[in-house]
Every structure is written in C-alpha cells, then in structure tokens.
Amino acid sequence: MTSTLTIAALASAEKMINAALRYDPATRIGLTQLEGKIIALQITTPGITIFMMPMDDELRLMSSWDGDADTRITGSLLALAQLSQTEIHNLKDSGVTVMGDLSLLADLQRLVKNLDIDWEEMLSQFTGDIIGHQTAQLIRAKLSWAKDRAKSGQRLTSEFLTEELKTLPGKAELNDFYQQVDDLRLAVDRAAARVEKLLTERKP
Amino acid sequence: MSDKKTTHFGFKEVPVDEKAERVAEVFHSVAAKYDVMNDLMSGGIHRLWKRFTIEASGVRAGHKVLDIAGGTGDLSYQFAKLVGANGQVVLADINASMLGVGRDRLTDRGIAGNINFAQCDAQFLPFPDNTFDCITIAFGLRNVTDKDMALRSMQRVLKPGGRLLVLEFSKPQSEILSKVYDTYSFKVLPFMGKLVTNDAESYRYLAESIRMHPDQQTLKEMMDNAGFVRTEFHNMTGGIVALHKGIKP
C-alpha cells in the first residue's frame, strides 16, 4: 500500500530532479524523446517500486502505476546504482534483471551518464552573472578534483593494502600463485596417469 | 406536515431542489481563494491526494478524460499533459465561478487545444454514452444532491473498461484521529475560513458535509449499485480521505 509519506518523498525528489534538469537542456531534449514511456524501478532492498515517466521535458516519479510498464528494472539499490555508472554490455552477474524494452534502459542510462548541470546558469539566477560565474568555476574545479581524488584514492587504497599492510596479495603475486596451482594440477594429472599406466602394466 | 422531499445540506435538512443553489452560493463565495484555503486547511496534503489519484488513473496519451467538479483545474492540468495532443480532457463544474477560475488558470499555464470546459450537473452529464476512458470527481460528490443518480450518469458516459475515480473525504480509521479531526474541522476550519475569505459559514458547511458523506464501505456499495465492477477503495492519511475506484463492465 502506498503511504502518503512515500508520495510526499517522491514528489520532493521529482521537484528537485526537475529543478536541476532545468539547467541541462540536452537532457531535457533527450527526455522528450522518451515521452509517455513508463519505466518501473523495482528496488528489492529496501522493497520499493518507483515508476518513472518522462512527460514534456520533465521526469515524473510515481509510487504506483495502474498499467503496464514498458521496461521493468529489478535489483538492489547498490546494484542499480552501479548500473547507472557503467555501460551496459551484459547484465549477467550484475544483480539486475530487466524485462521489456532494453533500449529504453540504455537511453535512460545514457541520459544519466551525460547529465551536465549548468551550475553557472543556476547560480546566476540568484547571485547575478559575476558571482554566479566565479562560484560555478569553483564548483566545477571542486567536482573535477573530487573525481580525480576518487580515482587516485581507489589506487592508493589498493596499494596501501597490498604493499604496506601486506594484508592482500598483489596482482603479480596472485598470477604467480595461479600459475603454481596450474603447474601442480598438471603434475598431479601426469602422476595419476603414470600410476594408472603402471597398474595396468602389472596386471597379468 | 409537508411531504416535500428533503436532503442534507451540511447538518441541515433542505428541500431537494434547494441544495444545488445553496452549494453554488458556498462555492461562489470561496472560488477566488479556493486554492489558498485548500493548501492552508490541508497543510498542502491535498496535492498528494490528487497526485495519487493521477497515478491510479492509468491515463495515457490519446485518452479522453472527464474531470467532474474539477474546480480550479488541478487534476485537469495533469491530465491534459498526460493525454497529449491526441487526447481530450473535459473540465466540468456546476459552478460558473469555479469553472472560470479553473479556465483562467489552465490558460495561464499554457494548457490549450486538448481541453474543453463544460458547466454541467454531475447528475445529468451532457455527453453521449461510452465517451470517456476515465472520469474523476475530486471533493465534489458530497455536494451532489442525488449521488446515486450522479454515479449512474457517470457510468453511462464511461466507455466499457473505463474507470471512475472518486476522491472524497471519508471516515478516519482510528478513534483518536477521528477526535482530533473533529476538533480541527469544527473549531479551526471555520476560524481559518473567517480569516482568509471572511466566510466562516461556507467552511462550517464543508466540515458538516464531510460528516454527512457516506463512509468508505457505503460509497463502495453505491458504486456497485450504479453498475460498476471491481470497485475498491484506498484510504489515505488514516482514512480522512479515500480514493474509490470502479470499472464500467
């Protein structure tokens, strides 16, 4: 059963998304091409289904939809979040299942990936052009810095765990270990074959 | 003793042929500030109730929708966007003042081409049989003199398979909520009405008419009797409001 609170939460989220989309004309145009399509986002943990419908150049979020969805995407919140960040080639092992029109999902994913909010335009509505421009520059620089940090942070963490703490094996070490396992397996196979041969030869 | 048939107007009994006129007076009086008062009285929650109604409507591009007692056009605005250029929405209201406010508001918001306006009585809908895919009546049925007749009229103009959605105040499901709600309706509402529209009487009528309106189960049975099938209701905000749904077979 849909509660008034869920409807309120979705209404707020919808308002925020559409307010942000006002400053990304390319995504708005992209949404008009998907107009009238219903995408059901079925989140397994926590259990909630959200229906998305592009209408005009806005996105509408609904707690229920009395009709068929064009595309139904099912998965945990984490799996769905990962899906929005990676290109879809194969959904196997992604923890996400899709029923219906897969191209609609690809279109939507492309829109999310190419989301480019014009911070400058948004801020200048409130602050005027000069302050808006300077603040937007700052936001852009910080976002770019945060993206770089996120990438290098991932690399540094893995180096720290493998090289400094030695809690995890390095890639080369692992490959060497796999090679040794392969060699051992082959040696055991050879030994087994030889024993088999000897036993056969000794039989009268 | 007079044998003239009467009906309720809030807690008062009035002759049947007077009710429409009296309801009209109430809405003429509040039309200009109807939306402000709705927001104030419900704390904005009426927008969520209407939002849920839109979700339950299943209206798609190309559909024909009749929004009865559509007043200031909240639902019609959303329906007009949903049905697109090939669909059609009819905003109907018995009250010229409310219809005028709704028409101006929709025109100001750029809604044109797929919307028509009709001043008509829900009991005698002036449309051919089997015309609409969906009919909604939000906070309007309790003001109708003969609700059964109105439901039959709606059933007639719906297409087979079409759905009727009745959004209306109903009976709170918990005793505590019911008591709080009573105090709010009979003490706070008329006071707010007095402050904003200088018309406490109209808002007293609003509170009384809500109490006189059939509860969830009774309205469901009335819809069954009018010929709807798969009737069901969904309580919102603890049953203060309920959305009833029925399909024309």
Image: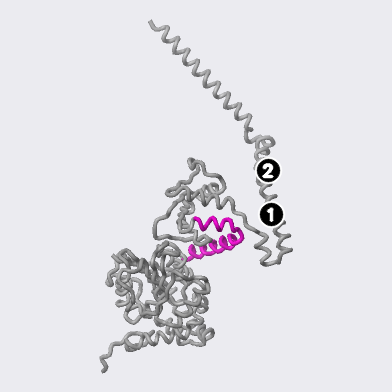
Q: What residue is rendered at 45% in x and 68% in y?
A: B80
Q: Chain of mark 1?
A: A
Say which amino acid is labelled 2: Ser
For residue A29, above or below residue A85: below
Secondary structure beneath label 2: helix
The residue at the far bottom in this view is: B1
The quarter of the rendered structure image containing the C terminus of chain A is top left
Q: Position of residue B51 (x, y in %)?
A: 46, 67
Q: Chain of mark 2?
A: A
Secondary structure beneath label 1: helix
Q: Which residues are magenta?
A: A4-33
Chosen colour scheme: one colour
For residue A203, side relative to residue A26 (left or right):
left
Q: Name the front one of labels 2 and 1.
A: 1
For residue A126, above or below residue A145: below
Q: Looking at this view, is B99 or B113 the one in front?
A: B113
Look at the image and say whether residue B206 sits in the magenta stretch.
no
Query: Would you say residue B166 is visible in this rendering?
Result: yes
From the image, tell me which residue sits under label 1: A140
Q: Looking at this view, is B46 or B89 the one in front?
A: B89
Q: Position of residue B41 (x, y in %)?
A: 50, 77
The quarter of the rendered structure image containing the N terminus of chain A is bottom left
From the image, tell me which residue sits under label 2: A152
User: Which class describes the residues within 10 Å of circle 1: few (<14), some (14-19), or many (20+)?
Assistant: some
Q: What residue is rendered at 40% in x and 77% in y?
A: B118
Q: Quadrant of residue B226?
A: bottom left
Q: Looking at this view, is A165 or B142 the one in front?
A: B142
Q: Position of residue B86 (x, y in %)?
A: 42, 64
Look at the image and say whether residue A13 sits in the magenta stretch.
yes
Q: What residue is rendered at 27% in x and 72% in y?
A: B225
Say which amino acid is labelled 1: Arg
Q: Position of residue A157 (x, y in %)?
A: 66, 41
